[in-house]
Amino acid sequence: MKFASLGSGSEGNALLISTASGADRTTVMLDCGFNIKETERRLQRRGMVPADLSGIVVTHEHQDHVGGVFKFARRHHLPVWLSFGTFHAVRKDCDGVQYRFCRDGEPLSIGHLELIPYTVPHDAREPVQYVVRDGRFKLGVLTDAGQATQHLTQSLSGCDALVLECNHDRGMLANSSYPPSLRSRIGGAYGHLSNDTTADILAALDRSRLKIVVGAHLSQQNNTPELARAALSSVIDGDTARIMIACQEDGFDWISLDALADQAGEDS
């Protein structure tokens, strides 16, 4: 399994997840918050073209995650998976798109990948995040949630890799120029995860298999990569897992879990 980001932040999100069985490869795109031309440009930067994709999987209806999904899917004849609640929020955009429903805890198979949706507390109709398996590795993704839940923690435990929202630093948000209502929404129970809340989530997980954790969805106004990295490091300092930080413009390049596993074997 390998994964890469086309971009991560309030201006657009898209995550590629890929695995191969022999010469047959399956690649899905998790969310697409960019327009068609920009998505194609960012795919090319990762050595991909739209025809390489097996489908698009959606977390929720906010525009930085779903803004480009249906136009892109329609243009390139790709199926889309989304929750029933998300569908109701975006149904006017679904014409001409082959869509399928997913729900909490029910695995969906796309080629050689198995994706398991899990519900999260976020201010959307029926938001889900995903754990992805390929028979060997397990990737957990959490990009939009307002607080930790037992269900969320159970879903993300035992992963080989994690992509975790580190949206804001509480102090920077409190002192930002945002109006009080927006600060309240972002920092609330159905908003976005602060660095320290994400660190608490990470500390509660089974990290025995963890090889890498990527801090994602950073606010450009209310966080810094250094603060996000410090929060993650406070939990896994001394562990063998690596830390990376995704950015809005570049996301991050392909991360191969096979390569990390091989390196871990060499290090041991």
Image: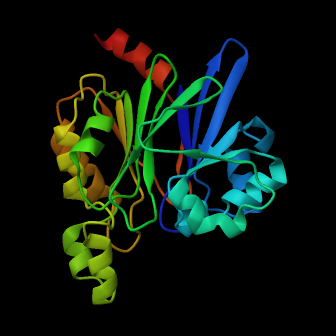
Q: Is residue 172 above or below residue 159?
A: below
Residue 9 is situated, as x and y percent measured from the top left of the image, at: 47, 62
Count all numbered tags in the image, as a single digit. Answer: 0
Residue 51 is situated, as x and y percent measured from the top left of the image, at: 80, 39
Is residue 243 visible to the viewer in this orientation of the structure? yes
Is residue 67 visible to the viewer in this orientation of the structure? no
The answer to which of 161 and 154 lies nearer the viewer is 154
Q: Is residue 158 above or below residue 223?
A: above
Residue at 30% in and 30% down: 241
Q: Is residue 44 left or right of residue 60?
A: right
Residue 208 is situated, as x and y percent measured from the top left of the image, at: 24, 23
Residue at 63% in and 20% down: 20
Determine the image quadrant of residue 173: bottom left
Residue at 42% in and 22% down: 260
Q: Is residue 116 left or right of residue 30?
A: left
- Where the C terminus falls, by quadrant? top left
Q: Is residue 217 above or below residue 229?
A: below
Residue 109 is situated, as x and y percent measured from the top left of the image, at: 59, 29
